[in-house]
Image (cartoon, rainbow, N blue to C red):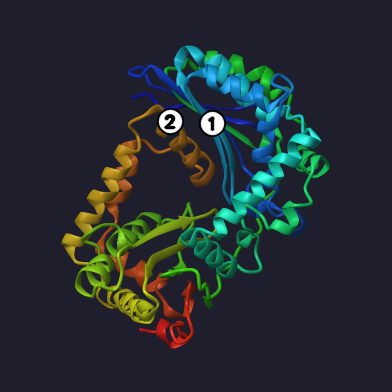
Amino acid sequence: MAEPFRTLTPDGTEILIEPLPHVRSCAVGFWVRRGSRHEAASEEGLAHFLEHTVFKGTEAFPTPDAVAEATDRLGGHVDAFTGKEVACFYGKVLSDQLPDLVQLLGDLVTTPRFDAEELARERSVILEEIAQSEDTPDDWVSELFYGRFWEGSPLAHPILGRPEQVAGYGPAEARAFFEATYRPANLVITAAGAIQPERLLDLLHPVLAKLPRGAGHGPDTPSRTRSFLLNVPRRDLQQVNLVLGFPAPSHRSADRAAANLLSHVLGGGAASRLFMELRERRGLCYQVGSYLSPYADTGALQITASCAAAQARELVQRAMAECARIREQGVAPDELERAKLQARTSLVFSQESSSSRMFNLAHQAIHQGELQSLDEQVAEIEAATGADLLRVARALLDPAQAGLSALGTRRGGEIRAKDLVA
């Protein structure tokens, strides 16, 4: 398969297009390289607020009803999300709907209206979203973890923002953030599917001409992790929800493949160390798993579980003991091969649609700074050795670097600092 088309406009917008002749759909994403970690302390939640409010009306689609009708007329799917390092507006449609998709997405990121009445209604929706997150234990315990693990750095900012700040946002705040952030040099556009690059470039030219001019932003503020122990009581919960985390490599680290495989061995499936030890042998929980959260300059390897309050302390102790065992002994050859197969399978499955190819292009361009073919990505997985995993485990799974948030603890069931030392 040919390499993706890649170009940089004179104003700094990066465009990547992967034609897929065997499909009849196309997917397009407009990616803004600014998320919650790029907000000032007085702006927490504004990236997410803006992602919501642009759907309330644009120059071509002046009302929420007009935006919704334009979306439905596409016959496909249009959505958006905000992360800690990006905001994304994307859609997937049949190839003959590409011009209309580009117009809609382009209007959202270039000509939002910021009507005061519409923003007031959407502000209430976002406040309900925050309340819903607080009422969802696995969401909230993760938010507590991030807030303490990166305390003192912008990565600790909650993506949704804090209610007391969001309640004060209106058209002035939204427009100021938009004009400072939604600039050509902060934008990446990715597309995949039944697309001719020249045709898409012609469609994008008038869109990009509408963006506010100005330079992009500089490097991210460096982030540092910190160890912590946080017990938060919630009497309305039947279980304790736990996030146990350690520092992990960034997106661009040479150890990213080894760290991903280590996470698979720890908690990546029904035969993983933590699942077998904590659920199957000990009966301490129903669900337990681990995953990586990499960022531009740092990351976290997180173990998540929920259990009865009376069993929370033992669960943490045994999870720490399993981490210590991997640090001391490494992983067995069959574990490593199983983890590699899981990683390869997940990678290949993720490349079998136009939308997943579009997302993969963005991930590589924005986070990794390079484009790898599927074969090159598989080769990176296969190159990781048992010695690599042992070295990474010894660097990461250090009790002195651990952070733990426990939501739902009751008197007598709190985790203690010494429980984090195997």
Check the image and name the residue furthest to the front: 236
For residue 313, what is the image quadrant? bottom left
Side (left or right) of 379 relative to 127: left
Give me the C-alpha separation between circle 2 and circle 1: 9 Å
Under circle 1, the secondary element is strand
Circle 2 packing at 10 Å, graded few (<14), some (14-19), many (20+), is many
In the image, what residue type sits under mark 1?
Tyr
Q: Which residue is mark 1?
A: 90
In the image, what residue type sits under mark 2?
Ser
Q: Is residue 300 visible?
A: yes
Give the x, y percent position of residue 329.
24, 75
Circle 1 packing at 10 Å, graded few (<14), some (14-19), many (20+), is many
- Earlier-in-chain disc, 2 versus 1: 1
Give the x, y percent position of residue 330.
26, 71
Q: Which residue is mark 2?
A: 355
Q: Nearer the viewer, residue 206 or 110?
A: 110
Q: Quadrant of the N terminus?
A: top left
- At horizontal 37% and vertical 24% (from top left) the residue drawn is 2
Label disc, if present, on residue 220 of the rendered structure: none
Q: Nearer the viewer, residue 35 or 185?
A: 35
- At horizontal 46% and vertical 68% (from top left) the residue drawn is 237
Check the image and name the residue furthest to the right: 172
Q: Are marks 2 and 1 in contact (CB under 8 Å)?
A: yes
Give the x, y percent position of residue 288.
33, 64
- At horizontal 63% and vertical 52% (from top left) the residue drawn is 160
